[in-house]
Image (cartoon, rainbow, N blue to C red):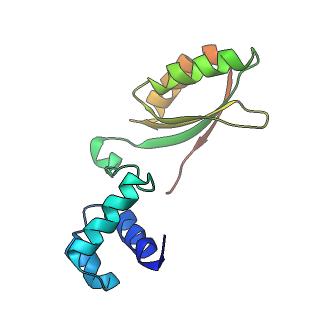
Amino acid sequence: MDVFDKKILEMLKINARESFANIGKEVGLSAPAIGKRVRQMEEEGIIEGYALKVNHEKLGIETKAYITLVIHRGPKVASDAQKQILAMEEVQSCDRITGDDCLCVLGYFKNNKHLISFLEKIAEYGASKTSIILEV
């Protein structure tokens, strides 16, 4: 991976739909050369995919929160809880973590009442601690 590839990745991180021609102008290579480099990075697994960025506020999401869970019944239960929590529509991510907590959940909620309902739902898995995101 050289400086050209790094610059291409930087531009694709900002806008994954940027044209190869525009990237080429910025980087100093032709559009076909950019296309070849992008395909090579995809084949090598450097680029794993392209994501959609959504304005959640326009969809009625007022509350975003990180929720950590302490599960005292062992790693198998934590793994099962992680799978079940990931399947919930509010959940954006659910990661196993080190430290006193077992899971860290990122959730998007319509409002605080919706968040409370979600917390009541996941209480069966363990003790939770919630941090509401004020600004991204």
Quarter residue 41 falls in = bottom left
Percent coordinates x, y for residue 35 in the rendering: 26, 67
Q: Say which of 66 and 111 sits in front.
A: 66
Q: Say which of 66 and 33 sits in front.
A: 33
Most extreme residue toward the right is 100
Placement of 120 over or under 105, stated as above or below? above
Mark count: 0
Asked if residue 91 lies left or right of residue 126, the reply is left
Percent coordinates x, y for residue 107 in the rendering: 49, 36
Asked if residue 94 lies left or right of residue 29, the reply is right
Placement of 110 over or under 51, stated as above or below? above
Residue located at (36% from left, 49% from top): 49
Asked if residue 73 lies left or right of residue 46, the reply is right
Percent coordinates x, y for residue 83 in the rendering: 52, 22
Q: Say which of 10 and 110 sits in front.
A: 10
Residue located at (46% from left, 72% from top): 6
Placement of 71 over or under 46, stated as above or below? above
Placement of 89 over or under 42, stated as above or below? above
Residue located at (43% from left, 31% from top): 90
Percent coordinates x, y for residue 44 in the rendering: 43, 54
